[in-house]
Every structure is written in C-alpha cells, then in structure tokens.
Amino acid sequence: MLLMSVTILIKKGGRFPNTHVCGNKHLRKRGITSAQTQDKQAQRENKMAVKESIRH
C-alpha cells in the first residue's frame, strides 16, 4: 500500500484508481450501475410511488 501511494504521489498526474461501479466504463457499457443509481431511476420512473420517510 505504501509503495502504491508513493508511486501515485511521485508520478506526474498520478491518481488513485476509481473503484466505484460508476467509474468503470466496461460496467457502464453493460448497463450495470450502483444501487443508489438504480434506486434513483426507479423513483423517477414510478410517479405513483409512496415516498419513503426516514425517522431517527
């Protein structure tokens, strides 16, 4: 882990890899999205859905 971070810091334009589902172009091509994105899409599509409320 230490060697990876040193390489990223020294390398010009070095970045940590984006490991999130939405950051992977191959998954996007297949139509695979994160659970949050799927939830947002489902809420937009269903206009008659009952809105959820979270109470603490």
Image (cartoon, rainbow, N blue to C red):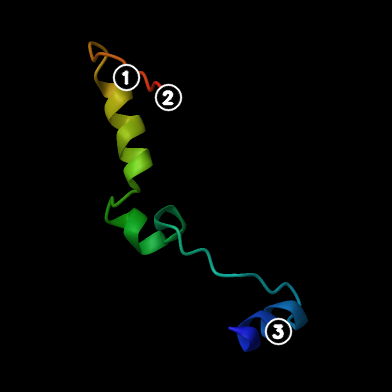
The answer to whether residue 56 is above or below residue 10 is above
SS of the residue under disc 2: loop
**Gap between marks 3 and 2 measured at Cα:** 42 Å
Circle 3 is placed at which residue position?
6
Circle 2 is placed at which residue position?
56
The quarter of the rendered structure image containing the C terminus is top left
Q: Residue at x 47, y 57 (%)?
A: 23
SS of the residue under disc 3: helix
Residue 41 picture quarter: top left
Disc number lying in front (2 or 1): 2
SS of the residue under disc 1: loop
- Kind of residue at badge 1: Glu
Residue 26 horizontal/vertical position (percent):
35, 63
The answer to whether residue 29 is above or below residue 46 is below
The quarter of the rendered structure image containing the N terminus is bottom right
The tag earlier along the polypeptide, 3 or 2, is 3
Circle 1 is placed at which residue position?
52
- Kind of residue at badge 3: Val
Q: Residue at x 35, y 48 (%)?
A: 34
